[in-house]
Image (spheres, rainbow, N blue to C red):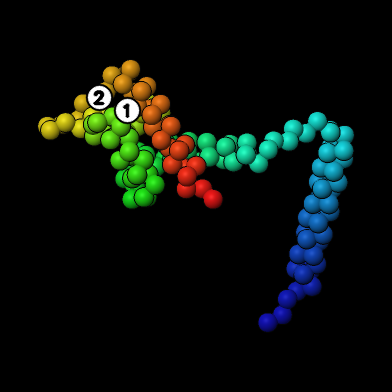
Amino acid sequence: MTIKTYLANNVLYEYKKELNQTRRIARLKRILRQNNQDYVSISSQAKRRQLVEQISKEIIENFLTSETNNPIVLEIKSDLEKEMQKQLVFKYAPSNGEELYILEKTDKDLKPVSREEKNQILQKLWELTIKKVDQTML
């Protein structure tokens, strides 16, 4: 198998352009850092708290409404149901997928919870999720 010279040259040319562009970006970042000394440094504890909140938000938005077997999500759901003393189902609206519906499981069917109950459930859910994620993170 032979490789044409012009093909090898084209690859080397593109590689050289990429290297130059990367160097240029690195140089610009360095210059910007030197000019902008207004960095806010936060403690590692604050960074951890921020990460815990981000993971908790992700759990609530994505995993809670799915049929997942993730042990952390199942524990959070279980703890929430114990606290609220009812079985709950979380679903997003089929029309727009934006609004979260919280339904209470009864003997016969599912019934939506009131706006006030929904706010209480979401507040409790947030607290439990933050606590659980904080406990499980290293």
At x 30%, y 40%, the residue is 78
Q: Nearer the viewer, residue 26 or 119?
A: 119
Q: Nearer the viewer, residue 73 or 36?
A: 73
User: Label 1 crowding class (10 Å Cα cut-off): few <14, some 14-19, many 20+?
Assistant: some
Q: Is residue 33 at all visible to an observer of this figure?
A: yes
Q: Nearer the viewer, residue 37 or 16?
A: 37
Label 1 sits on what residue type? Tyr
Q: Give the residue number, with chain letter if any, for mark 2.
A: 112
As drawn, is 56 to the left or to the right of 104? right
Q: What is the count of numbered marks?
A: 2
As drawn, is 71 to the left or to the right of 41? left
In the image, residue 74 sits, relative to residue 39, either above or below, namely: below
Label 2 vs 1, first from the N-terminus: 1
The part of the image, by quadrant, that contains residue 94 is: top left
Q: Is residue 10 at all visible to an observer of this figure?
A: no
Determine the secondary structure under disc 2: strand
At x 82%, y 48%, the residue is 26
> Which residue is situated farthest in the left direction here?
108
- Residue 42 image position (x, y, % from top left): 69, 35
At x 84%, y 33%, the residue is 37
Q: Are marks 2 and 1 in contact (CB under 8 Å)?
A: yes
Label 2 sits on what residue type? Pro
Label ID, residue 101? 1
Determine the secondary structure under disc 1: strand
User: Label 2 crowding class (10 Å Cα cut-off): few <14, some 14-19, many 20+?
Assistant: some
For the N terminus, the quadrant is: bottom right
